[in-house]
Amino acid sequence: MSNHTKLNLLELEDSVAGRAPGLEGRFGRTKLGTRDVGVSHWRYEPGFRAEGGHKHREQEEVYVVVSGSGELLLDDEVIALAPWDAVRVAPEVVRAFAAGPDGLEIIAVGGPKPEGGDGEQAPVEWPA
């Protein structure tokens, strides 16, 4: 096996296609052959607001805004997002994204993935 892997995230299959209108998600962990880090690309259409969120049992994540703007709901706190903001989120925090008028594009980076994964869907309630 080579000591490096190059991959264009936009050339990966949209793993979310058809399941969540207004959302695209591409996962690079498997194609990159990584052991300790995962990277994914997410694109939210303008005005998209997640109706549900997720959390993890073990994985810490960092989200980097590539373009657009929006909001990130972290448990019951909402923070604004702008290009090149990076946000670290502890595993147990429920998170959900909302896109601004220009949409939102992010790169998500996660730590080692436990056998079978550790992501859990979670309900969210956006403040009025």
Image (spheres, grey):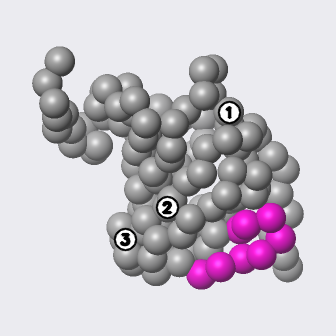
Other-residue count near label 1 (Cα within 10 Å), few / some / many at <14 / 14–19 / ≥20: few
Q: Secondary structure at mark 3?
A: strand
Q: Position of residue 95 (x, y in %)?
A: 70, 58
Q: Is residue 98 visible?
A: yes
Q: Identify the image quadrant of residue 94.
A: bottom right
Q: Residue at x 51, y 44 (%)?
A: 111
| Amino acid type, callout 2 | Tyr
Residue for badge 1: 118
Q: Is residue 58 left or right of residue 121?
A: left
The quarter of the picture where the C terminus appears is bottom right
Q: Earlier in the sequence, mark 1 or mark 3?
A: 3
Whether pointer 1 and pointer 3 mark residues with C-beta atoms closer than 8 Å, the reply is: no
Q: Is residue 60 above or below residue 33?
A: below
Q: Is residue 14 in view? A: no
Q: Secondary structure at mark 1?
A: loop
| Residue 45 percent location from the top left of the image | 49, 60
Residue occupying image coordinates x 71% and y 68%: 73
Query: Which amino acid type corresponds to the residue marked 3 in the rendered image?
Result: Ser
* Amino acid residing under circle 1: Asp
Left or right: residue 47 compared with residue 66 = right
10 Å crowding of disc 3: few (<14), some (14-19), many (20+)? some
Q: Would you name the residue on which mark 2 appears?
A: 63
Expressed as whole percent of the image width and height from the top left, the position of residue 91 reads: 69, 51
| Numbered range of the magenta stretch | 73-80
Q: Is residue 76 magenta?
A: yes
Tell me: 23 left or right of 68: right
Q: Assess whether residue 77 is covered by the magenta stretch.
A: yes
Q: Earlier in the sequence, mark 2 or mark 1?
A: 2
- SS at mark 2 in the image: strand
Read off the residue under disc 3.
67
